Image (cartoon, rainbow, N blue to C red):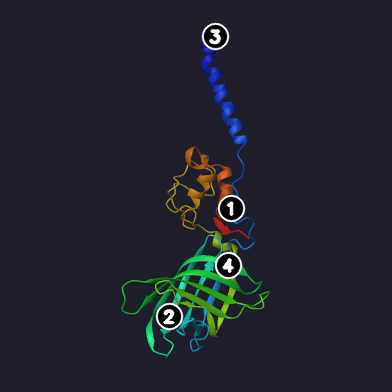
Amino acid sequence: MRKLLPLVVLLSALLVSSVALAQRKPPPSPGGGNPFLGETYEFFVGLLSLFPNFDPVIMAADNGDRLEIRGDGAFTIWPKVAHGGGTFVHKDATGNEVRRGRWLAVEFLSFVSYGFGGQVGLRIDLIPDGQPDAIPGKMQIDCPLGDAPPSAVFEARVVFQDSGLNFNQRVQGGTFLYRIHVDPPLCQGGLQGTCAHNLCRVGGPLDPACEPEFDATCVASICAVDPICCGEYWDQGCIDAVESVCGMCCCTKGIVPCD
């Protein structure tokens, strides 16, 4: 009878593991069913790339200061990525130049679709000429094409966080925003990065600190809702989470943004 005890213990362990696997639920989608997941948009402020001689966007602050700004870039809804930049000139109420330099998009914050155009919020760094340190700020770009609110106009509002200046009054505008069509060939590669294996293939557990090329936090996010993926094995449930958690879809060659 004592010889049967290890077998009973083994069967009990297998039963518990089977029940745990049966109770695994698909990880929740971070976008809550957001139809814009994976979409990429380009933006233009002053239409610099389209028309180099086009007038800049000019916005005014409550104290009369004005900001002339140009630039362009792109952003994706998920994973949240933004890049781009341009130039700016800050003048006081009498027209004297206060500072000029470059600005860089450093973080995607928000997006509201108007159907064709939309409104995007970005965190930016303003880098004045001759100054070693960047000034943090925020930019909101409006392109009121499509089903936009009646109050929406072509503008690029900017907040300088060092002085608290909020350039939110339009003097002249010229912004544009449009969606870039994403084709399936983007599914080639880009999944493994520093991870032990491709995220779209069954394999051993992955280190939550590893970083696939498309989203540095994807594996950690998956394992936060499904610890088995980093503690025991990377199975089909983990592969499915590449879509439900990270917003990307596995295909035969690699990965594509999900529609």
Label whose residue precedes the other's in the sequence (1 or 2) = 2
Dot 1 amino acid type: Glu
**Residue carrying label 1:** 243
Dot 3 amino acid type: Met
**Residue carrying label 4:** 111
Mark 4 near mark 2, Cβ–Cβ under 8 Å?
Answer: no
**Residue carrying label 3:** 1
Is residue 72 left or right of 22 when viewed as pictured?
Answer: left
* Dot label at residue 82: none
Q: Nearer the viewer, mark 1 or mark 2?
A: 2
- Vertical arrangement, residue 107 with respect to residue 43, above or below: above
Which one is nearer the viewer's eye here, 117 or 235? Answer: 117
Q: CA distance from mark 1 to mark 4?
A: 21 Å
Helix, strand or loop at mark 2: strand
- Vertical arrangement, residue 100 with respect to residue 246, above or below: below
Q: Residue furthest right?
A: 147
Q: Position of residue 76 (x, y in %)?
A: 54, 65
Label whose residue precedes the other's in the sequence (1 or 4) = 4
- Does the rendering let one see residue 198? no
Q: Position of residue 33 (x, y in %)?
A: 64, 56
Helix, strand or loop at mark 4: strand
Label whose residue precedes the other's in the sequence (4 or 2) = 2
Q: Nearer the viewer, mark 3 or mark 4?
A: 4
Dot 2 amino acid type: Thr
Q: CA distance from mark 2 to mark 3?
A: 83 Å
* Dot label at residue 87: 2
Res. 125 image quadrant: bottom left
Q: CA distance from mark 3 to mark 4?
A: 68 Å
